Image (tube, rainbow, N blue to C red):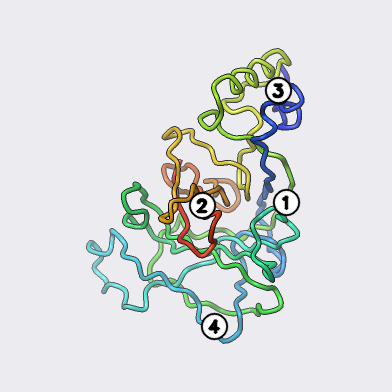
Amino acid sequence: MTDRSATAAELVAAVPGLARYLRPATLLHPYAAAPDPRASRIGGPALWPAGEPWPHCTAGHPDDAYRTAPRPSADGTAMVTLAHVRAEDAPHLPWPPGADRLQVLWCPNDHDELQGERYYYGPNVALHWQCAADLAPVTPPPPRQSEEEYLPTPCALRPEQVLDLPDRDELPAGLHAAATEFTELQGIEYQRDPGRADGWKLGGWPSWNSTDLVPVDCDCGARMVHLLTVESGDDPDLSVGRHGELHVFVCPVDLTHPVGLDLQ
């Protein structure tokens, strides 16, 4: 048995029915280093449009009632930079016209009322699609309160463009069985979901290794699509869920609709 994984291209060549499920993705491969402020990165120096206020989270935090310090004012808690992405590093994302930067901010506290009837207990996430020409260095206010595991260690990235296949729960049983049979015949290491790339990822497909498939739907009724996977551990030194993964979803109809969030 080899120590490699089956690529999506290999699987599609062997099982052509998988081709319709291929999605482009960018694996981020973060590593601890002082990142260039203008490069794609995790955490690091803040950039923001001149004259625009830094975003704050006004959602409630379950732990507020147990803190001895006063609760945050109506201005909320300053969000922190989770990721800064250049369009050239992830061209397959649904970039709005004129946007060439995606900034992912989150409130570094747990929340339990963000997803309505869908259970979620984790950070509040906001996406900002922006133009690099409008951004300038800023010093954002520190969050009034935060959880240590939600404050990322600044990391540079080694973006890698790949093709991605979905979790077995999103495939017809016959296609998943054929993909698994191919990997076994090739002597490739065991993969629960052959062809799906793991790790920090933009685009592609999410994993459902904890809850099995629970579709994420927008309030408008559209089935949301995966935008970002945040992985616990390693250099950013984050921990989401039970040291698992946070998946961020967007509405394919309107990017301004609230994001969908899921923990695995």
The image quadrant that residue 9 belongs to is top right
User: Is residue 252 depicted above or below 170 in this figure?
Assistant: below
Sequence-first tag of 4 and 1: 4
Q: Residues within 10 Å of mark 4 (few under 14, many from 20)?
A: few
Indicate which disc residue 159 carries: 1
Looking at the rendered structure, the kind of residue marked 3 is: Val
Sequence-first tag of 4 and 3: 3
Sequence-first tag of 4 and 2: 4
Q: Are marks 1 and 3 in contact (CB under 8 Å)?
A: no
Q: Which residue is mark 4?
A: 52
Looking at the rendered structure, the kind of residue marked 1 is: Pro
As helix, strand or loop, the secondary structure at mark 4 comes to loop
Q: Which residue is mark 2?
A: 248
Q: Quadrant of the N terminus?
A: top right
Looking at the rendered structure, the kind of residue marked 4 is: Glu
Residue 186 percent across, percent down from the top left: 73, 16
The image quadrant that residue 167 belongs to is top right
User: Distance between the Cα atoms at labels 1 and 3?
Assistant: 28 Å
Sequence-first tag of 3 and 2: 3
The residue mark sitting in front, 1 or 3, is 3
Residue 217 percent across, percent down from the top left: 44, 48
Indicate which disc residue 151 carries: none
User: Is residue 30 depicted above or below 199 in this figure?
Assistant: below
The residue mark sitting in front, 4 or 3, is 3
Q: Nearer the viewer, residue 166 or 132?
A: 166
Q: Which residue is mark 3?
A: 15
The residue mark sitting in front, 2 or 1, is 2
As helix, strand or loop, the secondary structure at mark 3 comes to loop
Sequence-first tag of 2 and 1: 1
